[in-house]
Amino acid sequence: MESKKVKKIVRDRYGEVAKKSSSCCGSKKVCAEDVSKAIGYTSEELESIPDAANMGLGCGNPTAIASLKEGEIVLDLGSGGGLDCFLAAQKVGLSGKVIGVDMTANMIDLARDNAEKNNFENVEFRLGEIENIPVANDSVDIIISNCVINLSPEKQRVFDEVFRVLKPGGRIAISDIVLLRELPESLRNNETLLAGCVAGAELKNKYLGIIRNAGFEDIEVMDKDQKLKDLEDTLENVGEPVLVIEGEPVNLENFEDVKEDLEDIQKSIQSITVTAYKPEK
């Protein structure tokens, strides 16, 4: 699928998510709070941020392993409603700064509104693409991202940009979705699964190779089970077979070539958190 089409699909999807932002549950959707707790956020963390910032769109909690320090400059790629930015802001304090970048104007508007209403003075949000990060060279201490880089059709470009804007000795703490085996072509080309962080995911070894090719060192990986696995039992009467994506069931009955393969497909989708360092000069 062409890069421009992929970006339009993602931008349109998350623009609509921002318009409908809510932590409420529907009969066929898991609460954003339940999703966030299942992927690693604590009740205390979720209570410390604006409700509208949590849309249950992540696949991990990068701030939990980022070892953030007072005074650091943090960059969040694909910042959405600002959940991870607001958590990071509390850790770096007023002497630090958090920059959120998102390519969706509606998300930026939502995040800025959340920041203003809740008096987060050390956070700013910038509209831009993660393939062309609107941040100066060698200017941030750490980059975090939560289930976003898999959406990019140009992942090497993203990590090259990440390397560019980090200070020498800077680090990344990124949660994302990878694959343990290739998906069938019918799933790779499905727009719902693309926007749902599955169809655009890379094989795990290739993903880590991209990070290494960008110049990073000391790469460490923490593996997790497929996101939301523990929440499947809370879904009500959605039909079988289903793939759970961001708290919503995707019915695969129309994909004749994968119906019998659903369990293997589920097992091939893995959430990981990666840390790595830009070498000192």
Image: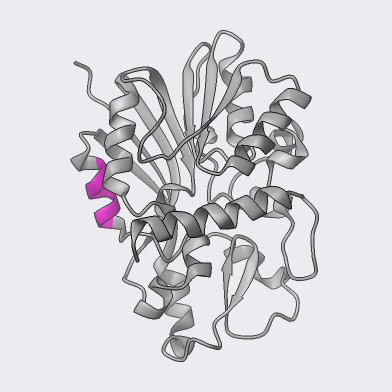
Residue 228 sits in quarter:
bottom right
What percent of the width, then of the height, locates residue 252?
54, 82
Is 181 on the left-hand or right-hand side of 214? right
Please provide the residue range marked out in magenta.
205-211
Image position of 189 with respect to 211: above or below: below
- Relative vertical location of residue 242 with respect to residue 111 in this rendering, above or below: below
Left or right: where 23 falls relative to 145? right
The structure residue drawn at horizontal position 64% and vertical position 28%, both measured from the top left corner, is 86
User: Toward the viewer: 13 or 266?
Assistant: 13
Q: Position of residue 34 (x, y in %)?
A: 71, 54
Farthest residue, direction top:
95
Q: Is residue 207 magenta?
A: yes
| Residue appearing at x 60%, y 14% in the figure | 93
Question: Which residue is drawn at the image coordinates 73% and 34% (left, top)?
Answer: 44
Q: Main secondary structure of the magenta part?
A: helix
Quadrant the C terminus occupies = top left
Rendered-image quadrant of the N terminus = bottom left
Residue 164 lies left or right of residue 196; in this view the side is: left
Residue 76 in sight:
yes
Residue 172 placement, left or right of 192: left
Name the quadrant containing residue 250.
bottom right
Q: Nearer the viewer, residue 103 or 249?
A: 103
